[in-house]
Amino acid sequence: MKTNYLCPNCRGILNVDNDLVLSVINSKKEHGLLLLHSEIGNYTSRKSDYFKIEKGEKIELHCSLCQANLDSKKHENFAHVIHLSPTGHESDIFFSKIFGEKVTHHVDQEKVFSYGEHCKRYADPEWFL
Ligand SMILES: [Zn+2]
């Protein structure tokens, strides 16, 4: 079994192989799908060229299954999904909703692993605990 990602609301599996499939609303209130690479720290993403998201734009991320808003309750710039390891262990992933901003925090009980070249923008390491 591989790593999977779950919606915190419906606990549906959000990934297909190496892509998380998320529903997005951009700042013009247009809807589209965004594929995010499932490897933590890999910021490759895919979408239709016709669905425009500007770099630096804050997007709304929703579960592609139940449409719940994936906003983190702990920080307005972050979305939250559940990381389910191959052994069935669950932990939390917080990643930036600002398109092009490379920041991910993987919080596993009390331990925090930070990824991405922009993680220093969120230097206060306590907010997501
Ligand atoms: Zn859901």
Image (cartoon, helix red, strand yellow):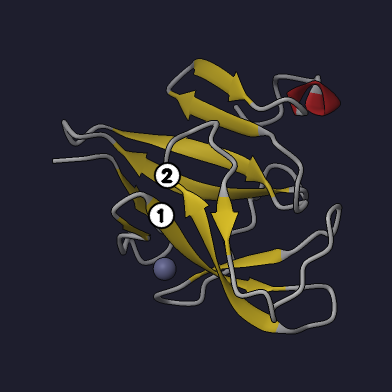
Which residue in the protein does label 2 denote? Answer: 38
Question: Residue sitting at 74 percent across and 84 percent down?
Answer: 30
Which residue does the image show at 37% across and 40% down from the upper left? 83
Task: Give, as a three-letter code, the residue at label 2.
Answer: Ser
**Which numbered disc, 1 or 2, marks the residue that appears first in the sequence?**
1
Residue toward you, 32 or 113: 32
In the image, residue 100 sits, relative to residue 126, either above or below, namely: below
Residue 127 is situated, as x and y percent measured from the top left of the image, at: 71, 29
Residue in the image at 50% along x and 77% along y = 67
Q: Is residue 13 left or right of residue 110?
A: left
Instruction: Specify the amino acid type for callout 1.
Output: Asp
Name the residue tied to disc 1: 19
Q: Residue furthest front?
A: 49
Locate residue 32: give its quadrant: bottom right
Tell me if residue 10 comes above or below residue 44 in the rendering. Answer: below
Counting from the top left corner in percent of width and height, residue 126 is at 70, 21
- Kindly check if marks 1 and 2 are in contact, taking CB atoms under 8 A apart as contact: yes
Inspect this view and state whether residue 8 appears: no
Question: Could you tell me how far apart the alpha carbons at marks 1 and 2 are, in whole angstroms?
Answer: 5 Å
Residue 34 as seen in the image, left or right of residue 2: right
User: Label 1 CB, ligand 1: below 8 Å?
Assistant: no
Judge the density around disc 2: few (<14), some (14-19), many (≥20) Cα neighbours within 10 Å: many
- Residue 70 position in % (x across, y down): 57, 60
Query: Which quarter shows the C terminus?
Result: top right
Q: Secondary structure at mark 2?
A: loop
Mark 2: is the Cβ under 8 angstroms from ligand 1? no
Q: Is residue 76 visible?
A: yes
